[in-house]
Image (cartoon, rainbow, N blue to C red):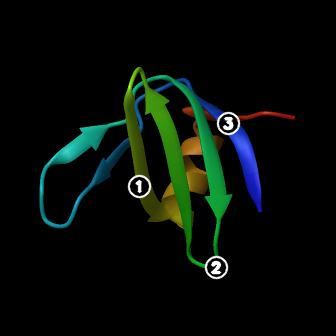
Amino acid sequence: MAQHAQIVGKVEYREGDGPLIAIRPGPVKAETGMNDVTLSWVDEEVRGSTAIPLADFNRFVKEGKIKLDA
């Protein structure tokens, strides 16, 4: 199930073993799977997407770094 959300705090993800990468503040689409949440966004002409563990997503929401749209 997809829902719209806003990144309003420091939300980071890691690609493989690489460094942490910040997701810029603004609107994202969050698609929840069994074990993870895929976040996708558009930053000017660049589209971004990443899957983060469901536990991390829930922590970001609880900490107020991701706000879910009603």
User: What residue is rendered at 23% in x and 59% in y?
Assistant: 15
Q: Secondary structure at mark 2?
A: loop
First along the sequence among labels 2 and 1: 2
User: What residue is rendered at 13% in x and 65% in y?
Assistant: 17
Residue situated furthest bottom in the rendering: 34
Image marks 3 and 2: residues in contact by CB distance under 8 Å? no
Q: Secondary structure at mark 1?
A: strand
Circle 2 residue: 34
Q: CA distance from mark 1 to mark 3?
A: 14 Å
Query: On screen, 40 above or below 36?
Result: above
Query: On screen, 27 above or below 59?
Result: above
> In the image, what residue type sits under mark 2?
Met
Q: Percent position (x, y) of residue 12?
A: 34, 42
Q: Secondary structure at mark 3?
A: strand
User: What residue is rendered at 43% in x and 50% in y?
Assistant: 49
Image marks 1 and 3: residues in contact by CB distance under 8 Å? no
Along the viewing direction, whichever of 60 and 69 lies nearer the viewer: 69
In front: mark 2 or mark 1? 1
Is residue 65 rendered to the left or right of residue 33? Answer: left
Q: Quadrant location of residue 60?
A: top right
**Which quadrant, please, contains the C terminus?**
top right
Circle 1 residue: 50
Circle 3 residue: 5
